[in-house]
Image (spheres, rainbow, N blue to C red):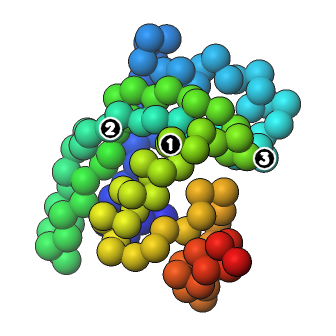
Amino acid sequence: MSAFVRLSSKLPGDVETNGVDALADALVKDPARIRYGVVWFDAAKVTEDTDSGDVIPTMRVRRIEPIGDADAVLPELATIVEDAVRARTGRSPIPFAIVEVDDDVDPDQLSLIEET
């Protein structure tokens, strides 16, 4: 869980903006399959902890559009995501196909392993 941002559990109810409803059967049949999509979001609320002074936004999904299975990602999208990660972190991105990374693993080492 993020220490800086919370995620609202609500999804948009409109079929025009909530594309994941169309995947309900597929999610039941194969819940472990990793899928990817595009998400539009904003902050539904901002909460201040009066004891610590922490201010935490709660992210709200405004629109979500599934694209496909993670093992068949479009190369153009992988490039866009890798460029965004590089711009955000200043580091080589973890290869797109890797979803979970152990906290002890250096992401730059993963990129080097993938390239060799």
Label 3 CA crowd tier, 10 Å (few <14, some 14–19, many 20+): few
Q: Is residue 110 visible?
A: no
Which residue is located at x 19 percent, y 51 percent?
A: 46
What kind of residue is marked 2? Phe
The relative height of residue 68 versus residue 19 in the rendered view (above or below) is below
Q: Which residue is mark 1?
A: 77
Q: Which circle marks residue 49 in the picture?
A: none
Q: What is the secondary structure assignment of the residue under circle 2? A: strand
Q: Nearer the viewer, residue 61 or 107?
A: 107
Q: What residue type is disc 3 on?
A: Ala
Q: Amino acid at mark 1?
A: Leu
Q: Based on the displayed image, in which of its 4 quarters is residue 10 positioned?
A: top left
| Image depth: mark 2 or mark 1 in front | 1
Q: Are marks 2 and 1 in contact (CB under 8 Å)?
A: no
Give the left or right position of residue 90, taking residue 95 as reference: left
Numbered badge on residue 41 = 2
The residue indicated by pointer 3 is 32
**Label 1 Cα crowd, 10 Å radius (few <14 / some 14-19 / many 20+):** some
Q: Specify whether residue 26 is in view.
A: yes
Mark nearer the viewer, 3 or 1: 1
x, y (%) of residue 91? 40, 76
